[in-house]
Image (tube, helix red, strand yellow):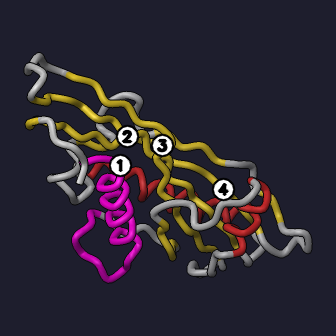
Amino acid sequence: MGRLEVRAAVTAYFQNAANPNNSTIPGYIPYVGTVYPARPLIVEETAYEETMNGLLVAASPTGGGAVLVVNIPTDARARKALTGRGAVNDLWDHHIALEVWYSNVGGEGITAQQDYDSIIDQIIYDIRADPTLGAPLVIWSAGEYEPNITHEQSLPKTSGDGLTIFINGVVRFDAQEWLNQGVTPPS
């Protein structure tokens, strides 16, 4: 397995959870449109933030919507049992940073924050509701152990014309693989 498979599994899980017609995920994440498997463009950070906020399409009754981006900024792999050099018994811990880009064209701060909070609440619920994120052959455990599931939110801000509210955040959790096999190179 590895980063490629974990990224694909995490992306598929949240794409399914953001689909209101999908019944395989524990809970539907409201107001989320696209879920990207990585940053869709590589530019200077302020330009990236402006571009991501510009991709949002209103989906909530109050004019809000979000996109998600799956990042794996760090990971660590460690042997967990003595197996000899020709075998593996490792835990590969992928630190996921799920970017949440939310905007609201309704212009009302409290309802924008409530929309954003409902998205975050459902993301965290869905991580804990299925510890394999729907991919038990890839992910052994997600969001169950230290360092816990955490969320950070930017301060809400408005567009230059004051008509759109932007709230950006990140949900962090670990997606772990338990590797127990012979040593083989990646395919």
Q: Residue at x 67, y 67 (%)?
A: 52
Residue 117's place in the image compared with 176, above or below, is: below
Residue carrying label 2: 94
First in sequence, mark 3 or 2: give its number: 2
Magenta highlight range: 1-26
Measure the C-alpha gap from mark 1 to mark 4.
Answer: 25 Å
Residue carrying label 1: 3
Q: Residues within 10 Å of mark 1 (few under 14, many from 20)?
A: some
Q: Residue at x 38, y 70 (%)?
A: 15
Tell which tag, 3 or 1, sits nearer the viewer.
1
In the depicted view, which residue is nearer to us: 56 or 64?
Answer: 56
Label 4's element?
strand
First in sequence, mark 2 or 4: give its number: 2
Tell which tag, 1 or 2, sits nearer the viewer.
1
Q: Position of residue 19 (x, y in %)?
A: 38, 77
Measure the C-alpha gap from mark 4 to mark 3.
Answer: 14 Å
Residue carrying label 4: 168
Measure the C-alpha gap from mark 3 to mark 2.
Answer: 10 Å
Answer whether labels 2 and 4 touch (C-beta < 8 Å): no
Where does the C terminus fall, quadrant-wise? Answer: bottom left
Q: Residues within 10 Å of mark 2 (few under 14, many from 20)?
A: many
Q: Position of residue 16 (x, y in %)?
A: 33, 71
